[in-house]
Image: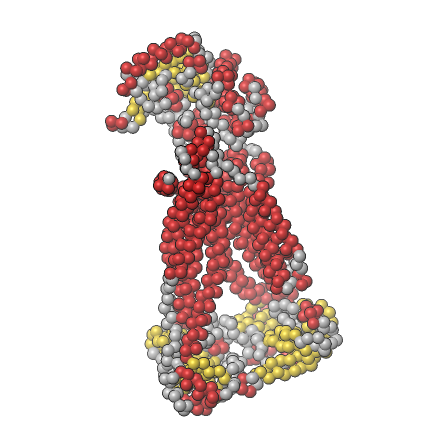
Amino acid sequence: MTTFDAAVSAEDLTKRYGSGDAQVTALAGVTVAFGRGELTAIMGPSGSGKSTLMHCLAGLDTPTSGRVWLDGSGRDGAGRVELTGLRDDALTELRRDRMGFVFQAFNLLPTLTAWENITLPMDLAGRRADAAFADQVIDAVGLRDRLSHRPAQLSGGQQQRVACARALISRPDVIFADEPTGALDSRAGAEVLGFLRRSVDELHQTVVMVTHDPVAASYADRVLFLADGVIVDELREPSADRVLDRVRSLESVAHGGRVSAGAGA
Amino acid sequence: MLRAMLRDLRAHLGRVAMTLAAIVLGVAFVVATWVVSDSAAATVRGGAQRTDLAALAQARTGDAVIPAGTVARLGALPGVSRAEGVVEGYAALVGRDGKLGTTSWPATAGTDWDPSQRFDLVAGRGPQHAGEVALEQQAAEEAGLSVGDPARVLLGGDRSDTATVVGVFAYRPAGREFDPAVAYDADTATRLLRPEGAPDGATSGSVPGFARVELFGADEQAVAAAARAELGAGFTVDPGAALRQEQADNAAEDGDIIRKALLAFAAVALLAGVFVIANTFNMLVTQRTRQFALLRAVGARRGQVRRAVLAESVVLGLVGATLGVALGVGLGLLAMRLLPVAGTVAYAVSPWAILLGYAVGLLVTVVSAYGSARRAARVSPMAALRTDAAVPRRSLVLRTALGLVAVAAGVALVALTSPEELTEPKRIQAMAGAVLAWFGVLLMAPVLALGVLRPLARVLRRGPVTRIAMRNAVRDPRRTAATASALMIGLSLVCAFSTVGETMTADLTSSVRAAVPQDAVLLRAAAFGQLDDTVRAKAAAVPGLSALAAPRTGELLVLPPRGRNAEARFTGLEPAGLGTALRPTVTSGSGDLRRGVLLDARFAADTGLRVGDTVRLRFGTAGKDGAVAPVEVSATVAGLHEGSDLLPGVLIDEALVPDGVDGWGDSVYAVGPDHGALRNALEQAFAQRPDVVVQDREQLLDDLLQAFQLVLGLVYVLLGAAVVIAVFGVVNTLALSVLERTRELGVFRALGASRTLVRRTVRRESVVISLYGGLLGIGAGVLLGGVMQYVILANPVFEMAVPWPTAGVALAGMALVGVLAALWPARRAARADILAAIAAE
C-alpha cells in the first residue's frame, strides 16, 4: 500500500477508549495510505471507527499506538512529518498550514464574514492569501457576491461552500472532510461534492472524506470500507450502486459480529 | 418541575458561583456596615458611663470659671454629700519624637486627679504630689510613654513642665466633654494649668476656679434642684441620669452617622451587584432555552416556568445571603478590631443586621432575576425542535428611549440652575439632575456599546485575535453593556469624587498661592492648637523680619446703614501685615486697613454695601454670669476683596477688635528680605516649642491638602467594593460566553489556532469590555463630578479640574481587571476539547 505517492499514511493504528471491562476498541490496527491528488472516501456503519480514524489522521485525536505521517513531498519545503508524538503546538501549526477541514455542521465562526472565515487559517498563520488563487477558489465555490455576509445570512449549502473554500485557501497537503453533506439537502450536497471533486481534478488537491452516503462516496477515486476498527474492503472507480452493494454485504457481515462493535463515531 | 430546576442549579454550581460571589459581597458589605456602626455606638456607650455622679454644674459660656467659694457652698447644700471642682487647662503632651499628641484638644487636655469614676486606672497609680503625672492611655500610647518615663507637658506660652509618669488611665466623660491627656494632683493642677492664652506672667494661684463642679449625693433630682437654686441663671445643672442619656444618645447618633455614610457605599455596591446578578441570570436562561422549551412542550405553563426560575433565584439568594451575613459579621468585627480605638472595644451584632442581610440578599437576587424569569417563560415550545433556538430578545428601543429621556431631563434640570443664584433647592435640583442623567447613561450603555465598539471593530481589522475579540464583544451588546455597567457604577463615582477633589485642590492651591507670598515663612500651631500672643511677640523680635501678620478669625454681626443686619466672619490682623505677609485680592477700593475695613465682595453684593459706606460691627464678648455682651464698633468700608480660606470675611485692624472677643488664630505669616535667613532665625527662636511648627507656603498647602486626600482615599476604598463585585461580573460573563462558544472554540482550535492564541482572544475580549466600562465610567464620572463641584462650590459646571492621573490610573486598572478577569475563562477556553466541540450532534 505504500508503493504509490501517499499524502497521508498510517501504520498499525489502534485506538482504545476506557479500560478494563469497559474498554472499547475503536481502531484495531489500521495500516492505510491516501494517494496524493486523489479523493478517498471512508465508509462504514456507525461505530465502525471511521471518524476516529480521520481524527487520528488529522492529529485531532491521539492514537493508543501506531504511527501517522503527513508527506508534502517537498512542496513549499514541506517534507515528510510524523504526527504521532508531536506536541500540541506543533500539531496546531501543522493543522493550520498543511491541512484543511470541512465539517458536517459547517462550523464557521458566526462573528466573521464569509471572506474572513475563508482567510482565517492564513490569518492565524499571519500570512496573506495569494490573491489570484483566492479569486480562483471563490469563483469555483460561486460566492463572490456573498463575501461580506455573516454565516447566519447564508444558506446551509452556501455555508458549506465557504467551509470548503476555507479548507482550500492555504493549499494544504490534505483536506479532511467529515460527513460534508450530512446536514445538506441533495442538491446542495451535490454542489459541495462537485466542488471537492473539481479541487482534486483541477487543483490536484488531496481529499479524505468520511461519509455514510453511497452517493457521496461515488464521487471518490477510491472507497475504503471500515468495520469494527479494521479496513475490510476497498473499491476503485466506484459508482453509487456498487458502493451500496458493498455496504449491504458488509452490514450483513457486521450483523453477525455486532458483539465486538466499538464506539467512536 | 421545581425539583428538576433545582437539580439543574446544583449541577451547574460553577456557573452560579460568580453570581453567588456578587450576592455574598453585596450582603456582606451591608451587614458589616451595620455591625461596625452598632459596635462603634456600643464602644462609645459602654465602659465609659459615670454612675457615681448625681449632677454636673457648669457655666453657660465655655470660658467662665466657678470660684472655689461657690464649690464650697455647693458642697454644703442639703442632700449633697460632696462637691468636687474640676480643673481644666491648656496642656500638650510632648511625645518621644518631640511632637505633640493629637488624641486630645490641647486647650482642655490638662485636669486634676480625683478619686471619682472619672479616672479608670489601667496601669500604675494616681499622681500624689508635684513632679508626678498620670496620662490618658491613648495619649500615652501615641506619645510612646509608659509608667516610670519622664513626660514633658507644654502649658501654654513658653511654660512647660517635666514630671514622671506614675499612672495611665482611661477617661469616663460626663456628658459632652473632651478626654484630657494629662492629670496632675489637685494642688499641682491648680498651680500649673490655666486657660489657653492666659498671660505669661500669671503667678501660681492666679487661676480663679474650676471649669465644672461635680456633685455627689443620693437623690439626683434633689441635688440638681438645690444646685440650680444656688447658682442662678448663668449656670446649667444636669442630673446624672440626663448626662447618661445624653451620652447614650450621642453614641447612637455617632453610630447612625457612620451607618448612613457606609450604607450609601453599600447601596452603590449593591447596585453593581444587581447588574452582575441580572446579567448572569440572563445568560443562564439563554443557555437553557431548549430545556425550558422542552418543559413547555411537555405541558408546563408559562407561570410554572417563571416561578421555577424565580424559585432558583430565591434559593440562590438564600444561600448567598447566608454566606454574606457570615462574611459581613466577620468583616465588621475585623474592622472594629483593626480600627485605632484604645481601651475595650464592644462588639455588637444585632438581629437587625442579620435580618437586613437576608432581606437585601433575597430582594436583590429576586428583583435581578425577575426579568430573566419572564423571558424564560416566553420561550415557545417550538424552540425545543430547533437547533438554533434562542430566547426571545427584547429590543433596545424602549431602553434607549428611556435613557435618552433621562439624560435630557437630567441635563435640563442642571441647566435650569445658575452659579449666581444657587439656593438650597436649586442645589438639590442640580444634583438630582446629575443623578438622573447618570442613570440615563446606564440605560443607554448597550446602544453606546454598539456606537463605540462597532466602528472600533471595523477599524481594528488587523489580526484575528483583535478582530474576533471585538466581534465577540459586540455580539450581544446588552450583555457587554451590563458587564461594563457594573464596572461603570463604581468607577464613575470614584472619578466623580476625584473630580470634586481635584477641583477643590485646585481652588485651594490658587487661593493659598494668591494670599501667601512665595517667600513667606509660616508659624503654625501643632495639633489643633492656637498661637498665643507670646508667639507673635517672639516672632516679631526675630532679626531679618520686615512684616508679620497674625490673623485671628471670629464671628460678628454687620449692621449696614440700610437693609437688614447680616452675620459674617471677621479676620483681625495688623495693618502692616496686610498686603505684605498676607495679600488679599482687592477687587475695589483700597487694601489699607488704616483707612477702614475690607468686605468680602460677595457679601457686599448681597447686602448692597459699597466702598465709602459706614457700617457698625457688633462683636459678642463674654460678659458677667456667662451672658454675651455685645460691643459695637463703627467703621468705614475702605475696599472689597475676594474672600478666601486664609482671609475670610470682614478684614479689620486687630486694634479695633474689642477685648474678650472669641477669635481663633493658628498661624503667623512673616516675610523678610532673605527667606532662608528668616526661616533659620524663626526655627532657632522656636526650637524649644513643639507646639509651634515653622513652615514654607508649599508645606502649608501640603498640610491643608493632606486631610482632604485622606478622606478621598477612604471614599475610594469604600467604592472599591463596587468595583470588586463588578470584576466578578466580568469573570462571569466571560466564563459563560466561553461555555456557550465551546463549539466555536473547538473549530478555531481545529483550524490551527494555538492554545496561546485562544487565550489571547478571550483576554482581549475581556480587556475590551473592561475598557469600555472604564471609558463610560470615567466619562460619566467626570461629568457627574463637574455637577457635584458646581453644587458644592458654585463654580460653573465645566470649570471642573479633570483628574487626569486618576483617570489614567483607572483606565490602566480596568485593562488590568480585564486581564485578571480573563485568567480563568481563557484557560478554560484554551482547554476546550476539539473533538467534543466539532462532533456532529
Q: Residue furthest right?
A: B612
x, y percentage for residue B32? Answer: 41, 58
Please name the residue shown 46% across and 68% down the image. Answer: B253
Quarter of the figure with residue A249: top left
x, y percentage for residue B19? Answer: 42, 46
Q: How many marks?
A: 0
x, y percentage for residue B430? Answer: 62, 58
Q: How is the image coloured?
A: secondary structure
Q: Does the rendering let one see residue A4?
A: no
Please name the residue shown 49% across and 14% down the image. Answer: A197
Q: Nearer the viewer, residue B666 or B641?
A: B641
Please name the residue shown 46% across and 31% down the image. Answer: B382
Quarter of the figure with residue B607: bottom right
Q: Nearer the viewer, residue B625 or B636?
A: B625
User: Would you place residue B168 above or below residue B298 in this image?
Assistant: below
User: Would you place residue B129 above or below residue B247 in this image?
Assistant: below
Indicate left or right for B304 with B500 as reference. Answer: left
Q: Does the rendering let one see residue B172?
A: yes
Please name the residue shown 56% across and 84% down the image. Answer: B627
Indicate left or right for A141 with A249 as reference. Answer: right
The quarter of the picture where the N terminus of chain B appears is: top left
